[in-house]
Amino acid sequence: MKNYLEINVVRFIHLLRHAGIRIGSGEVIDALQALTLMDLSDREAVRAALKATLVKRPGEQQVFDKAFDIFFAPPEMQQERQADYQQKQEYRQQMLDEATEDLSFQGTPMDISDQEKTVYASIPEQDREKLQDYINKTAGGKNVEEHFRPLLESVVKGSLSYWRKNLRNEIDLSEAPKTGDEELDAMVEGVGSGGGDGSLLEEDMQNIADKDVPRARALIRKLARQMVARISRRYRQSKKHKQLDLRKSIRHNIRFGGTMFRLRYRSRRIQKPKIVLICDVSGSMARYASFVMQFIYGIHDVVGSIESFVFSEDVERVTGYFQHGSDFNATMLEVVNRSTEWGRGTNLGASLKSLRQKYPDALSGQSYVLIVSDTKTMALEDSVQELEQIKRIVKDVIWLNTLPDDEWDGKSVQLFQKIVRMYPCNTLSDLEKVMRQKIIA
């Protein structure tokens, strides 16, 4: 029992050190001695003893409390965190692998760092495609030899440096923690998530203080970019079932006397899904509305082809307000001032019926509909019927629910969950988790 206690205290101190709390060997001994005087079944007594012996500076208390809650969490929460961490690492590795494949010179990966690959994966889709097209045309040009590679790498690195500066507030370039213990790595990331915005990530969005709104908006913009990056990578040009492009192959191999050393292929671009955002701006959602609009704005700033609507008693198309590069505050003010639906009661059924009748081109077999709402609505049965009808028309419907998990026992939630996939979206942390899920298959 004593050895088990000592091992756990040492691992907990290892976590605190990675979180930035300076702890010496004397403080470790003090902590172990203090615990011998405590009732170890009293969680708060153990917390107080460890805090009193390990924390010496006022600014470290919040970090300690978060680390304590994570390290001494129930087993089921530990397993959930571990699974979430592994999923995030798999996603990061997939992103790096795809960037390595794109940033190559005649089939050989260029000398690009992991941070630069992360930047590449985060830039707007159209700009990423332009860079990739430039690489392909340059590397496959006439009389292009290996000595051209350093020049091309320099151009690519310069472009990525430009985007790194422009997206510095929206890209997480921190290295994944490596303690040699994957379970501890997940805890280290949990304590330090968000670059100091950990508490903000867990805060109910309607309770975020005014002073924290700029940071919250930056996080939402970052999450929106991550979601779009996931979607766009899943539907980029196919690498499989390529057809030989005989004309390009002959032209490219003239320098070899016509011998087909390097074949050229053509491939069909997979049709990208249409994304339709439908966001609730009724009275019950009023305190979430600003963040909902920021979410739409963040997505539109990356991909301008998404159709966006707001609704309460009826639906309004707001796609036209989100011009690339426009100021969010000005956009928000214009939408609110011109909207006839903002802050009114909710009638999802009537809104979906209007969407289906007035904007049929937005709904097709390639459309994914994202609904952001707390599920509260008048005419619940009509809303269920309309949702079922929409579901039959489109590829899929995904619901981001702003109600906390413990309020998901209402009738509306249960009825809508039978029709669509529903994810919690009450905090920025919820939104971050949704972005890492394969919500669009």
Image: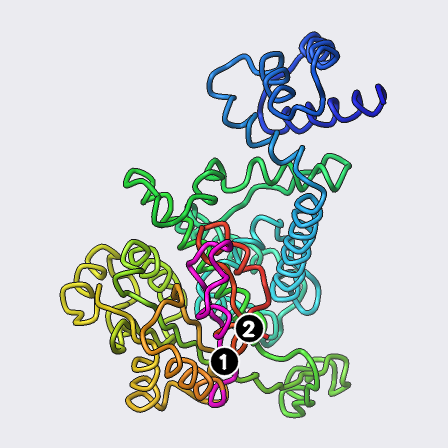
Label 2 neighbour load within 10 Å: few <14, some 14-19, many 20+ = some
Report the amino acid beneath label 2. Ile
Give percent across and percent down for residue 322. 28, 68
Secondary structure under badge 2? Answer: loop
142 lies left or right of 14: left
Report the amino acid beneath label 1. Pro
Which image quarter is the N terminus in?
top right
Indicate the quadrant where residue 242 lies: bottom right
| Image label count | 2
Q: Is residue 80 above or below residue 377?
A: above
Earlier residue among tags 1 and 2: 1
C-alpha gap between disc 1 and disc 2: 9 Å
Residue with the mark numbered 2: 440
312 lies left or right of 69: left
Give percent across and percent down for residue 371. 41, 71
Which image quarter is the C terminus in?
bottom right
Give percent across and percent down for residue 323. 27, 68
Highlighted magenta segment, given as a residue range: 392-415
Query: Do the residues under discs 1 and 2 have CB atoms within 8 angstroms?
Result: yes
Q: What mark, if any, has residue 67 been given in the picture?
A: none
Q: Is residue 191 above or below residue 257?
A: above
Indicate the quadrant where residue 240 lies: bottom right
Residue with the mark numbered 1: 273
Name the foreground residue: 282 vs 53.
282
Query: Which residue is located at x 53 percent, y 58 percent?
Result: 120
